[in-house]
Image: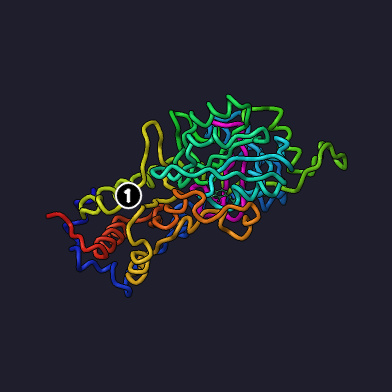
Amino acid sequence: MVRSISSDIKPGKHPLVSREQGSFPFLDLTAQFATIRDEVMNAVTKVMQTQRFILGEEVELFERELASFIGSRFAVGCASGSDALLLALLALGVGAGDEVITTPFTFAATAGSVARVGATPVFVDIDSASFNLDANQVASHVTDRTKAVIPVHLFGLAADMDLIADTCGKYGISVIEDAAQAIGAEYKDRRVGTLGTFGCFSFFPSKNLGAAGDGGIVTTNDPILADRLRLLRVHGSDRKYHYQILGTNSRLDALQAAILRVKLKHLVFWTECRQRKAAVYRELFHEYNLHSLIHLPAVPDNRSHVYNQFVIRCQNRDGLREFLDRSSIPTEIYYPGPLYLQPAFAYLGYKPGARPRAEAASREVLALPIYPELTEEHQLAVVHAVASFYGRRRKE
Ligand SMILES: *Cc1c(COP(=O)(O)O)cnc(C)c1O
C-alpha cells in the first residue's frame, strides 16, 4: 500500500513538502461534505419543510439509531458534549461537597463539568503509554466523598475499563465515560458508552461523528436515569409548565439530528479509513527508521482505536513542530498542559509537578493530521518532513 507511492514520489524531492504547492489542512471537513452533499441537503430540506426544530421525530429516530449503534438501551440527545457530561452528573445528583476522579490530560469540559455542578475534580495521573487515566491510581484517590469517576477515552482509545469498573464497584461509585473522542471504539467487543453508568458523546464538527454545529448525547442502560436526563434537558418539565426537578435547556436540534442520521450511516466506513491511515503512518515511520525516536499510539489488546487524533510522542517536540510548520505540515498539540495548571482550576491548589506523567506528555505530544479523506501523498509528506528534521532517511 505504502510502497506503491514510494515508486512515484522521491523522498527529498517531494513536491508537497514545499510551501507553494499541495499544502493540506489539519482537518478537511469540506472533503467529507463533498461525498455526502446530496444526502445531507435532502435531510436539511426535509426538516425545513416541517419547521419542527426542537426535539421531535428526527431527534427520536437519531437517538434510537445511535443507541443501537453503541449497544446501549437509551440515548438522550443534548446541546453539546460538555452538556452531556453536565447532565450525567446532574442525573446522578453530584453536587457541592462531592468529589469526582478524572484525568488532567483532557479537554476542559471533562473537569469543567464537575466544577460546574459544584463538585471537586480530583486529578489522577495518566498512563504514559495510552495517555488515559491510570486505572491503578484510582483506588488511592477514593474518599467517602467520591461520587463518580470520569475516564476519558482519549484520542479514540478506550481507557482501562475493567480495572476502573472493579474499583468503582468495590466502593459503590458511578462511572461516567467521556467518550467524546471515541465513538465506535471497542473495549473487549463492546463499544464505549456501554461500559459505565453513562456514556457522553460530542458531535462537535471535529469529532469522528460531527454535526453542523454543536450537539451531544448521553447513553445509558438505566431507564430511570434516562427519564431523568430527558427531564433535565427541558427544565425538568414532564408536561407543559409543570416542573418536576430543576433542569436546564439542553436539546439536540432536529436539524443536527437529521444531519447526524445521514452521517451515522457512514461512520463505520470513516472509522475504517482512519484506521487505515494510522496503519500507513506506522508503516512509514518504520520505513524512515523513526520508530526508535518516536512513540506511536499504543493499542492494547482487546481494544480498537478510532483515531480521532493520531498523537505521537517525540524528542524536541517544539523544534519539530516549528520545522513542520515551515514545511507546511499542519499539526496540533493536545494538550499543552494538564488542566490543573490552567487559571480556571488554580483554586484547586495543584502545583507544577503534581501529576508528572501528564506534564511530561504535554511537553512531548504532537497530533498529526488524520481524517478519512487524507491521502497517502499527504501522509508521506508528513513523515518525510519528520524524518528530515531528525536526519533520518528512508530504508533502501
Ligand atoms: C470535545 C470534547 C468534549 C466536549 O465536547 P463539546 O461538544 O465541544 O462540548 C468533552 N470531552 C472531551 C474529551 C472532548 O474532546
Name the quadrant containing residue 201. top right
For mark 1, does the 10 Å Cα neighbourhood hold few (<14), some (14 to 19), or many (20 or more) residues?
some
State whether residue 389 appears in this view.
yes
State whether residue 41 appears in this view.
no
The amino acid sitting under disc 1 is His
Q: Position of residue 209 (x, y in %)?
A: 51, 47
Q: Position of residue 257 (x, y in %)?
A: 62, 46
User: Residue 211 colored magenta?
Assistant: yes
Residue that mark 1 sits on: 295
User: Residue 309 colored magenta?
Assistant: no
Q: Nearer the viewer, residue 307 or 112?
A: 112
Q: Is residue 56 above or below residue 38?
A: above
Q: Nearer the viewer, residue 127 or 267?
A: 127
Q: Is residue 128 above or below residue 225?
A: below
Helix, strand or loop at label 1? It is strand
Label 1 lies in ligand 1 vicinity (Cβ under 8 Å): no
Q: Which residues are magenta?
A: 195-219
Q: Residue furthest right?
A: 241
Residue drawn 58% across the image and 55% down it: 212
The overriding secondary structure of the stretch rendered in magenta is loop
Q: Position of residue 283 (x, y in %)?
A: 25, 48
